[in-house]
Amino acid sequence: MGYEHLVFPGNSLFLVTGGAGFIGSNLCEAILQLGYRVRCLDDLSTGKQANVDLFLENPNYAFIKGDIKDLDTCLVACEGVDYVLHQAAWGSVPRSIEMPLFYCQNNIVGTLNMMEAARQKGVKKFVYASSSSVYGDKASLPKREGVEGNLLSPYALTKRANEEYAKLYTKLYGLETIGLRYFNVFGRRQDPNGAYAAVIPKFIKQLLKDEAPTINGDGKQSRDFTYIENVIEANLKACMASGEAAGEVFNIAYGGRELLIDVYNLLCQLLGKNIKPRFGSDRKGDIKHSNADISKARNLLNYMPSWDFQQGIAEAIEWYKENLY
């Protein structure tokens, strides 16, 4: 279970793009703890320097401040790299609806730059973050790879485009790409601030301040919330996957399903709060229900997520209590 036992060739170098972000910084930390080298590439547009400052004294860690929209930067970053864990992207479905051109440049062109740089520099594996948003309006549950609906946002379109480019890069150029469709990841270092903050850190912060959070819609929408430790496991196991997994995409989740109102009530219970939420309108571009079939990742990546929602939320709350105030 987990990833602590994984062994890579001795002097392996991992490039984590978006390494100063929530998921990226957790990947950097895990790889360094395993004793391997990490190069972090981030332009700090959404990532935070504070997330990676704790690695600065580690001789196995190096930081490049740079933008994936610049191919030369990507080529420099990929020099001598064995494994790329590509997390750099702008998230948020609602924000992408407001900024479609920027999302195309950053998420599609930026990712294509990274694939091309990885190809030119002979990277062994290119593992990239996709998203459950690619399932669009397909209502059937659980979500299965290969059964997708109509896309609902520019963000989802960028992730689908990345998957198609990755498939081509494997087929045409032999770059071993593996796409990870994340389902509602949460955990330590996820930013609770701003209009586009994810729901769990936002709710925790507001409840700790005795404020009433706003739930978009009726609270009956469901999500397959996925603790960060499971995502770290998926990325590292993808680096070790056989050639059979190359060019493929995989659901990365726990395989559970929580109603948003139940999550809110659980947070109130765990934080000892009795605050009634407000209810707002549905968010444009949002998927109503989300629940993943993870059998493909289990079979081809040996992905065996060991952190369920309850375990993850308890640890996340402790982190926010210690780090928010």
Image: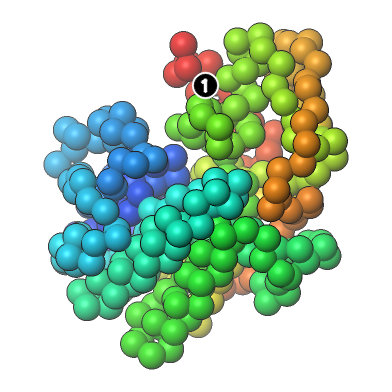
Among the 4 quarters of the image, the one containing residue 133: bottom right
| Of residues 241 and 291, the one drawn nearer to the viewer in this rendering | 291
The answer to whether residue 46 is above or below residue 280 is below
User: Which residue is depicted at the point 57% across and 60% down?
Assistant: 154
Residue for point 68% across, 77% down:
146
Q: From the viewer's perspective, is 38 left or right of 140?
A: left
Task: Please give left or right for residue 42 compared with residue 234 in the image.
Answer: left
Residue at image x 45%, y 59%?
101
At 28% from the left and 46% from the top, the residue drawn is: 43
Q: Is residue 12 in view? A: no
In the displayed structure, 52 sits above or below 90; it is above
- The spot of residue 203 in percent (x, y) is 65, 25
Q: How is the image coloured?
A: rainbow
Residue 264 placed where, x, y %? 75, 27
User: In the image, is 286 to the left or to the right of 44?
Assistant: right
What x and y, as percent, mark residue 40? 26, 49
Question: Is 316 placed above or below 282 here?
Answer: above
Residue at label 1?
A: 320
Residue type at mark 1 is Tyr
**Residue at the limit of the structure toward the bottom, as seen here:** 172
Which is nearer the eye, 302 or 112?
112
- Can residue 116 be seen from the camera position used here? yes
State the SS at label 1.
Answer: helix
* Count of residue discs: 1
Q: Where is residue 320 in the image (x, y as percent from the top left)?
A: 52, 21
Disc 1 residue crowd, few under 14, some 14–19, many 20+, Cα 10 Å = many
